[in-house]
Amino acid sequence: MYYSDSHTHTILSMDGHVPLSILADAAIAAGLSALTVTDHYDFFTEDGKKAPPLDWGPSLKQFRETAPRYAGKLDLHLGIEMGAGACFPQEARAFLDQPELDFVIGSVHNMSPEKGGIDLFYLNFDHLEDCYATLDDYFTSMAHLAPQSDLYDVMGHIIYPLRYMPDGVSLLGYKEVIDVILKAVIQAGRGIEVNTCRGKTIGAWMSILSRYRALGGEIVTTGSDAHTVEGLGRGIAQACDLLRETGFRYVAVYEKRKPVFHKL
C-alpha cells in the first residue's frame, strides 16, 4: 500500500520542532512511501497583523541537502502551506513561481481582516455562538479562495475550526457554502486533503468526502499535519480506508504542481 503524508512541518515552521532529516527517518520507520514537507507561509501573524515576506532560502537549503540522502528510500517532495493567500493574491502568485515547488496547500488559519485576523488557535470557543460566528467567517474565506485556482493545489483542512471547538458543533448549517467550495475546487481541477490532525479527526471527514465524491471530486491527498515525529503519519492508513469507503480509488501525491495518482 502506498501511504503518503502530504502535510507536515519542520523546524522552519514557527510551530515545528524537528528538521526534515528527522521527519524523513521517521517516515521510513512508519512505513510511509512518500513525504511532502509543507512548512507555513501565513500572510497574517497570530494577532492579525500583516506578516513579513517569507525567506524561502532556508527551505530550499534544507530540502536540497536532505532529499538526495533518501533517493530510492522515500519519495520526498517540497511543498508549502500558504495561509490567507487570497487576501494578498499578487504577493502569493509571485512567491508561488518557484521551479522547485512540488505542492501548495491553500489554507485559512485566521479570521478575515474584517473580523480582526486573529489566528483561530487563540480564540475562545466556550460559547456556541462564538463557534458559529467563526465558522461563518471561515467558510466565507474558504469560498473566496476556492475559485482562485492558481493559489493552491489542494484546499487545506476544510473542517479546520472543528479541532478547536466542542464536539457538539455541527456543520449541517454550512452544507450550501461547502457545496460552493467543493464545486469551485472541482471546476478548477484542484483537490482537497484529508487532514487527520495527527489521527484525531478521521471520522469527521466522512460527510465532506462523500459529498465531494458525489459532486465528481477525484483529487485527494492525505496528511497528518504533523509538527513532531510523534504525529507523523498518524491516521494516514485510516484516511485511506475512509477514502475507499467513500468511493475513491486513488490518493494523490504532487510533483511539480501536478497530481500523481496511486491506487488505494
Image: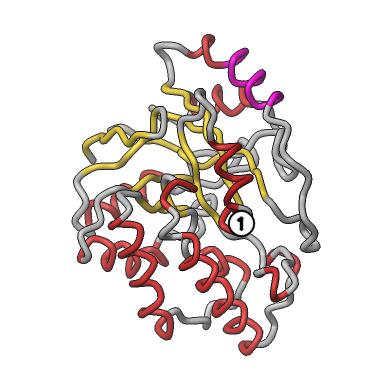
Q: Amino acid at mark 1?
A: Ala
Q: Is residue 196 left or right of residue 221?
A: right
Q: Is residue 183 above or below residue 244?
A: below
Q: Nearer the viewer, residue 138 or 121?
A: 138
Q: Is residue 61 magenta?
A: yes
Q: Nearer the viewer, residue 75 or 93?
A: 93
SS majority, magenta: helix
- Secondary structure category for the residue under label 1: loop
Q: Nearer the viewer, residue 152 or 148?
A: 148
> What's the magenta region?
57-66
Image position, residue 225 (x, y; %): 55, 47
Image position, residue 28 (x, y; %): 47, 24
| Displayed quadrant of residue 148 | bottom left
| Displayed quadrant of residue 38 | top right
Image position, residue 27 (x, y; %): 50, 29
Q: Is residue 94 left or right of residue 101?
A: right
Q: Nearer the viewer, residue 57 or 230?
A: 57
Per the image, the residue denoted by label 1 is 84
Q: Is residue 251 left or right of residue 225?
A: left
Quadrant of the snapshot with the C terminus: top left
Circle 1: is it few (<14), some (14-19), or many (20+) Cα within 10 Å? many
Q: Is residue 90 above or below residue 102?
A: below
| Displayed quadrant of residue 209 | bottom left
Name the residue at 25% across, 56% down: 217
Name the residue at 35% across, 34% down: 258
Q: Is residue 177 magenta?
A: no
Name the residue at 61% across, 87% down: 128
Name the residue at 62% across, 26% down: 20
Quadrant of the snapshot with the N terminus: top left
Image position, residue 186 (x, y; %): 29, 57
